[in-house]
């Protein structure tokens, strides 16, 4: 028997386990999506070192890269660093 058939058999005999599988699967999916977002959108990560070795220097001061910002309006920020 494969693992999938064992799980199906258990879910048929114990239907109260279905919400557990749904929430565990949803949590695993959301954590993988968040890790993918961090790897692709975070300015601290540099995938192309040859063409863009320091991607954090090319960010505008009003660029929002955080997923959730509490009471922060990035459109009104002024430039606070020199150009390199």
Image (cartoon, rainbow, N blue to C red):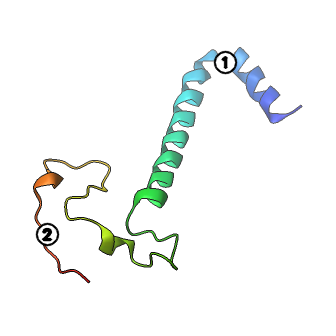
Name the residue carrying label 2: 79
Name the residue carrying label 1: 14
Quadrant housing the C terminus:
bottom left
Residue 29, by quadrant, is top right
Rendered view: 78 above or below 82? above
**Separation (CA) of disc 1 from disc 2:** 59 Å
Q: Nearer the viewer, mark 1 or mark 2?
A: 2
Q: Residues within 10 Å of mark 2 (few under 14, many from 20)?
A: few
Rendered view: 57 above or below 34? below
Q: Residue at point 56% right, 28% down?
A: 22
Rendered view: 39 above or below 1? below
Label 2 element class:
loop
Return the residue nearer the eye: 26 or 54: 54
* Lateral position of residue 59 relative to residue 19, left or right: left
Instruction: Determine the residue located farthest toward the bottom in the rendered image.
Output: 84
Q: Position of residue 31 (x, y in %)?
A: 49, 46
Residue 43, by quadrant, is bottom left
Q: Residue at point 81% right, 27% down?
A: 5
Q: Position of residue 83 (x, y in %)?
A: 22, 80
* Lateral position of residue 33 relative to residue 16, left or right: left
What mark, if any, has residue 71 been given in the picture?
none
Return the residue nearer the eye: 32 or 43: 43
| Label total for image | 2
Q: Residue at point 73% right, 23% down?
A: 10
Mark 1 or mark 2: name the one nearer the start of the chain.
1
Q: Position of residue 76 (x, y in %)?
A: 10, 55
Rendered view: 17 above or below 62? above
């Amino acid at each position: 028997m494969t693992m999938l058939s064992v799980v199906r058999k258990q879910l048929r005999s114990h239907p109260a386990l279905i919400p557990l599988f749904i929430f565990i699967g949803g949590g695993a999916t959301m954590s993988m999506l968040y890790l993918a977002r961090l790897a692709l959108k975070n300015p601290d990560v540099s995938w192309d070192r040859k063409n863009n070795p320091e991607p954090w220097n090319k960010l505008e001061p009003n660029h929002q890269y955080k997923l959730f910002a509490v009471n922060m309006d990035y459109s009104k920020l002024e430039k606070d660093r020199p150009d390199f």
